[in-house]
Amino acid sequence: MVKRRTILFASLSAAKSVLAQSGPQPIITPLEELAIVTRDGRRHLFRVEVARTPEQQTVGLMFRDHVPEDGGMLFDWGSPRESSMWMKNTLVSLDMLFITADGRIHRIAERTIPHSLAPIASRGPVRATLELAAGTVERLGIRVGDRVEHPIFGGR
């Protein structure tokens, strides 16, 4: 019995050591196509991860050291609701787009502050939140009222 407990304890200690060395890991989901259509008719294509489960939504883009220029994460809330995000354990700055059920951009928060615990609110009910690399909104001229195309918003 003592030997068995010692082996179990040694295995648990080894597992904790490996986790401590590797640190927290991001949750990676399959990529899906998404487009943002700006008011001037330009269509910008992205390949994004979609966070649908509570676990995926809790971790989001935490622990990532890079977000591709044409990548990001779409948080699908399932139905319209108030959305409040934060940057805890997020290593890079992001642009956040809060999107209504019909795919219109309701609010934009640009160049968020890594590791900040300050809430970033949608300021109204939204169906989804899209996180992109910081500077994407400015670079592509994305504005409130522009349209996001993805199956969760109907069409396409």
Image (cartoon, rainbow, N blue to C red):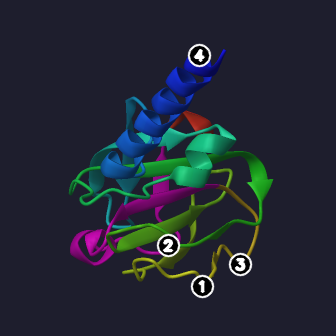
**Discs 2, 1 touching: Cβ within 8 Å:** yes
x then y, percent, for residue 144 = 50, 74
Instruction: Report, in whole angstroms, how far the alpha carbon at label 3 lies from the one at label 2.
Output: 17 Å
Q: Secondary structure at mark 1?
A: loop
- Mark 3 or mark 4, which is nearer to you? 4
Question: Residue 37 lies in magenta, yes or no?
Answer: no
Which is closer to the viewer, label 4 or label 2? Answer: 4
* Amino acid on which disc 1 is placed: Ala
Label 4 sits on what residue type? Arg
Q: Looking at the picture, how far across and down is residue 21, in whole percent?
A: 31, 49
Disc 4 residue crowd, few under 14, some 14–19, many 20+, Cα 10 Å? few
Rendered image: mark on residue 4: 4
Query: Is 9 on the left or on the right of 122, as rendered?
Result: left
Distance (Cα) linking label 1 and label 4: 48 Å
Nearer to me, 87 or 140: 87
Location of residue 59 with respect to 144 vertically, above or below: above
Q: Which label was assigned to residue 123?
A: 3
Residue 2 at what x, y percent from top left? 62, 21
Q: Which numbered disc flags the more N-terminal residue, 3 or 4?
A: 4
* Residue interval drawn in magenta: 128-149
In which image quadrant can residue 135 be found?
bottom left
Nearer the observer, 41 or 70: 70
Question: Tag 1 or tag 2, which sits nearer the N-term?
Answer: 2
Q: Earlier in the sequence, mark 1 or mark 3?
A: 1
